């Protein structure tokens, strides 16, 4: 548990210079030098990308020359990521094997650096197996979303021969089976990951940004402004959020952008309340007084001095919110008013599965499992971040 | 007590006005005016411009927005929520029909949440770090993360379709009217099992997590050590000394859970074709029945306010440290 800080490790070198040939493979150099975590990460990621490239070579070639924007993004991302692994691996291996002269040689300075709150939090997070597993799952899903055109074995919208391909049970040809139109459910699920993840992330960004600005304005100016702004928050909190979303989605024609805005702009109240509380206590501190005395404009004080000091807990609530947003999008799409077919989203896929429950159980099963796994991962990640940042347990263990 | 209740009720009034205001401006920010929305309902039918103008006047749409707003607030205050496009009936009576169903569902789910959540929370806290505690913690996190509407579908598939233990949907059987009085109650409860379970279980998972942490916090207090030092039995220490103090904030949690329960009920009611407020709202949203949609959303908010009021009052009654007069507005 109490591993020594990373920085105090002596520079390492390859055990045998003749092994340099293998060290060109990303991660191998790290493994040979005993940096297991970095080595396995680099090696695993490279092997994953390379095997996608090799196994889906035909799809890659076709997508490479295609003019569609998502094909372009997927193929270029794959190439750049592979190249990035190679370059980073070599650069990092060199950095490790050469003694660091720029850093102070003083051992107390090094250990002070290792005990900086950020480092300590990172280390504590890395020790939390569940949270790390959740992080990997999320990264994997993000990768799937970006590389969707390369990974999907079929066109997600293709309705070729429904009489022969409808409601096929899961098999090697169709991992998740097919739906009533004979569409490959795995391909649709892969594309659905895109919608679910991007809506989730973007909506949280909207909510957290708006909530942070709103809450800090209320907390910083106080008095009448605070009173008026927070009364509005009281009113919005009274609405069951899902009803509010339902109303807004129905009134404004829901495109992807509108959906993101609606999800975001109905979910910022928690962040606003929290930030306001933080700002109220922060603004009494001396450094803010100093900033005021220097005559800095309100804008600079709020954005440069107040918000960064209240940011860490917001990060936790943001990662918790992603799961909720993905769930809300799925719920709306399930009801048929969020993302509408033919665009696949896990929510509308489950909705389609509801109608087929008696004849084809797999239609509802697979998108739901993916959805549950994603939301679970985000919740575990949030737990991990919170535990890692919690100063109460931090003190006890490391300082 | 009565004075406190009246005071809280008065404090709720500005929030109610705020809710009505937000709903009003949502309708007015929407692309197109209510007239067009109404016409959209009758697609394909031509309407003479004169008739259109007449309807506009009848609904007061020719007046400036602030006049319409004042009128709307006045109408809402009198319980007149307009007329549904689809049902051609006063919205208020439609909602009144559906509210009992939603209340049945949410109140039973809240009970389930309380009993199961608190029970599991206590058990986990007392056996902290045991295998059962770890298992329950992980299980509750998983259940908390599963989307309720999907869980509902899966349970329907297993318990209704394959095993045939519970009905797949609706709030009563087809032969409901022929049943005896007890049979009717039984039939109702039989239809409630799955929806209540799905709605309550996710909240119960959250409550269990909260309860566990809260009880552990209380158990590390000095007065618990003192109680143990006095030689009291562990059971007495936990049930009499720790639990009472851990329970108080749980009440607020139930107040906070209410919006989520109502929101979750929308999806669950859809899965089970349960004729509550949520199903009504979804139908209204799908059919662009704006008066109905706005009114159901408003009613849901009103239910949340009433629920929180109830939680506040109970909280004040249970916790002697809170002086009823000096409580600051939430």
Image (cartoon, coloured by chain):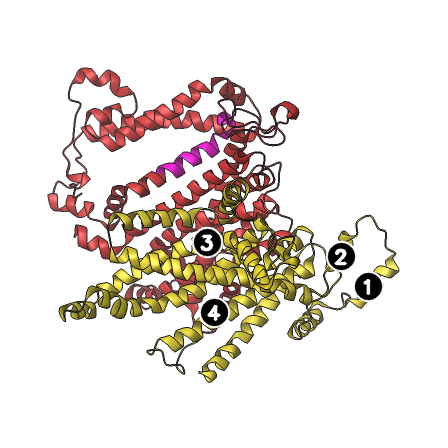
Kind of element beneath mark 4: helix
- Dot 2 and dot 1 residues touching (CB under 8 Å): yes
Q: CA distance from mark 3 to mark 2?
A: 37 Å
Q: CA distance from mark 2 to mark 1?
A: 10 Å
Hue used for the chain lettered A: red
Numbered range of the magenta stretch: A136-158
**Dot 1 or dot 4, earlier in sequence:** 1
Q: CA distance from mark 1 to mark 4?
A: 40 Å
Q: Do marks 3 and 2 share a subunit?
A: no
The image shows residue B226 at horizontal and vertical percentages of: 16, 70
Which residue is labeled 2 in the image? B38
In magenta segment, residue A139: yes
Seen in the picture, residue A70 relative to A125 is either above or below; the reply is above
Seen in the picture, residue A304 relative to A140 is either above or below; the reply is below
Kind of element beneath mark 2: helix
Kind of element beneath mark 1: helix
- Dot 2 and dot 4 residues touching (CB under 8 Å): no
State which chain disc 1 sits on: B
Which residue is labeled 4 in the image? B308
Q: Quadrant of residue A309?
A: bottom left
Q: Which mark is residue A314?
A: none
| Colour yellow, chain | B
């Amino acid at each position: 548990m109490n591993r020594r800080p990373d920085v105090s490790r002596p520079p390492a070198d390859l055990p045998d210079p003749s092994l340099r040939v293998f060290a060109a493979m990303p991660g191998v150099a790290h493994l040979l030098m005993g940096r297991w975590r970095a080595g396995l990460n680099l090696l695993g990621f490279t092997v994953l990308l390379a095997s996608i490239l090799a196994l889906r070579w035909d799809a890659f070639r076709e997508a490479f020359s295609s003019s569609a924007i998502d094909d372009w993004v997927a193929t270029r991302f794959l190439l750049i990521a592979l190249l990035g692994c190679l370059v980073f691996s070599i650069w990092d291996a060199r950095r490790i094997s050469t003694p660091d002269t720029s850093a102070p040689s003083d051992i107390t300075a090094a250990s002070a650096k290792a005990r900086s709150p950020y480092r300590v939090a990172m280390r504590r997070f890395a020790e939390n197996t569940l949270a790390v597993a959740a992080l990997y799952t999320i990264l994997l899903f993000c990768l799937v979303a970006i590389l969707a055109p390369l990974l999907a074995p079929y066109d997600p919208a293709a309705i070729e021969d429904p009489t022969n391909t409808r409601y096929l049970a899961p098999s090697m040809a169709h991992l998740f089976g097919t739906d009533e139109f004979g569409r490959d459910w795995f391909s649709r699920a892969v594309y659905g990951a895109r919608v679910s993840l991007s809506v989730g992330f973007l909506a949280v960004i909207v909510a957290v940004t708006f909530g942070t600005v709103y809450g800090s304005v209320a907390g910083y100016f106080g008095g009448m402004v605070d009173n008026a702004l927070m009364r509005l928050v009281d009113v919005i909190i009274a609405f069951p959020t899902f009803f509010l979303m339902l109303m807004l989605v129905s009134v404004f024609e829901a495109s992807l952008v509108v959906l993101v805005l609606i999800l975001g702009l109905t979910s910022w109240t928690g962040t606003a309340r929290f930030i306001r509380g933080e700002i109220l206590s922060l603004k009494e501190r001396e450094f803010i007084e100093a900033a005021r005395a220097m005559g800095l404009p309100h804008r600079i004080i709020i954005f440069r001095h107040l918000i960064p000091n209240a940011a860490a807990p917001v990060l936790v609530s943001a990662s918790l919110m992603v799961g909720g947003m993905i769930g809300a999008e799925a719920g709306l799409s399930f009801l048929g008013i969020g993302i509408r077919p033919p665009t696949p989203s896990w929510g509308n896929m489950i909705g389609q599965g509801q109608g087929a429950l008696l004849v084809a159980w797999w239609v509802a099963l697979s998108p739901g499992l993916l959805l549950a796994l994603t939301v679970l991962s985000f919740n575990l990640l949030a737990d991990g971040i919170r535990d890692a940042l919690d100063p109460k347990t931090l003190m006890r263990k490391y300082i | 007590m009565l004075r406190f209740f009246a005071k809280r009720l008065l404090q709720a009034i500005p929030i109610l006005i705020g809710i009505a205001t937000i709903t009003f401006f949502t309708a007015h920010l929407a692309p197109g005016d209510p007239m067009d929305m109404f016409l959209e309902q009758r697609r394909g039918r031509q309407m003479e411009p004169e008739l259109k103008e007449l309807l506009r006047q009848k609904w007061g749409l020719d007046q400036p927005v602030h006049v319409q707003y004042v009128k709307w607030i006045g109408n809402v205050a009198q319980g007149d929520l307009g007329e549904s496009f689809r049902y051609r009936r006063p919205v208020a009576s439609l909602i009144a029909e559906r509210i009992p169903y939603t209340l049945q569902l949410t109140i039973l789910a809240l009970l389930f949440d309380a009993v199961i959540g608190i029970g599991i929370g206590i058990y986990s806290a007392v056996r902290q770090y045991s295998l059962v505690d770890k298992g329950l913690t992980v299980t509750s996190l998983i259940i908390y993360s599963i989307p309720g509407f999907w869980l509902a579908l899966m349970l329907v598939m297993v318990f209704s379709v394959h095993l045939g233990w519970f009905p797949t949907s609706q709030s009563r059987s087809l032969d409901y009217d022929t049943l005896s009085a007890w049979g009717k109650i039984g039939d109702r409860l039989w239809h409630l099992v799955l929806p209540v379970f799905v709605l309550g279980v996710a909240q119960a998972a959250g409550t269990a997590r909260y309860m566990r942490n809260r009880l552990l916090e209380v158990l590390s207090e000095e007065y618990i050590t003192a109680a143990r030092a006095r030689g009291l039995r562990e059971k007495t220490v936990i049930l009499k000394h720790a639990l009472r103090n851990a329970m108080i904030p749980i009440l607020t949690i139930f107040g906070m859970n209410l919006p989520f329960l109502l929101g979750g009920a929308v999806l669950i009611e859809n899965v089970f074709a349960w004729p509550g407020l949520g199903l009504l709202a979804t139908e209204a949203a799908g059919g662009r029945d704006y008066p109905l949609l706005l009114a159901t959303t408003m009613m849901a908010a009103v239910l949340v306010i009433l629920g929180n009021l109830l939680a506040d009052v109970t909280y004040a009654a249970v916790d002697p440290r809170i002086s009823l007069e000096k409580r600051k507005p939430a």
